[in-house]
Image (tube, rainbow, N blue to C red):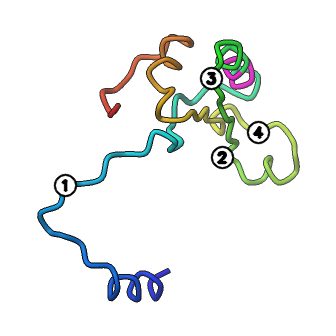
Amino acid sequence: MGIINSILRLFVRRDPDAPARLPSPDELVLLTRPNGEIDASLLRQMLDADGIHAMVKNRDAVSAESGGMGPPWAYELWVLRRDLRRAREVIGVAGDGDES
């Protein structure tokens, strides 16, 4: 990636006075870290029932590779940034003020 970025910098001139880009509403953001696969699945179903698409990630490489159930600490629930506030309300998770 370093070479590609270097080449792109030659062709793309950025205005130093330009404002920073806003985060994309289609970006995936971490909603919560449930306590295990069962909790993660239940929370995802609650969000789905409210029309919010969510994704469960298993951060444990061994169980993810084998298709088995991972340790409780390994699960994360991700949603689109545009759905973050509503998703927090649906599952009752407090925000940490990083919403844009």
Residue identified by numbered label 3:
52
Q: Is residue 52 left or right of residue 62?
A: left
The residue at which mark 2 appears reads as 59
Residue 16 lies, with reference to residue 10, above or below; the image says above
| Residue 70, label in figure | 4
Q: Is residue 64 above or below residue 55?
A: below
Kindly identify the amino acid type of the residue bearing the numbered disc 4: Gly
Whole-number angstrom distance, CA of label 3 to CA of label 4? 24 Å
**Whole-Å distance between the Cαs marked 4 and 1?**
42 Å
Q: Main secondary structure of the magenta part?
A: helix
Q: Is residue 90 left or right of residue 66?
A: left
Which label's residue is closer to the chain start, 4 or 2?
2
Query: Which residues fall within the magenta stretch?
Result: 40-44
Q: Between 54 and 61, which is closer to the camera in this rendering?
A: 54
Q: Which mark is residue 19?
A: 1
Q: Kindly identify the residue that appears in the image at 87 percent across and 41 percent down.
A: 68
Amino acid type at mark 2: Arg
Label 3 or label 2, whichever comes before in sequence order: 3
The answer to whether 54 is drawn above or below residue 92 in the figure is below
Q: Amino acid at mark 3?
A: Ile
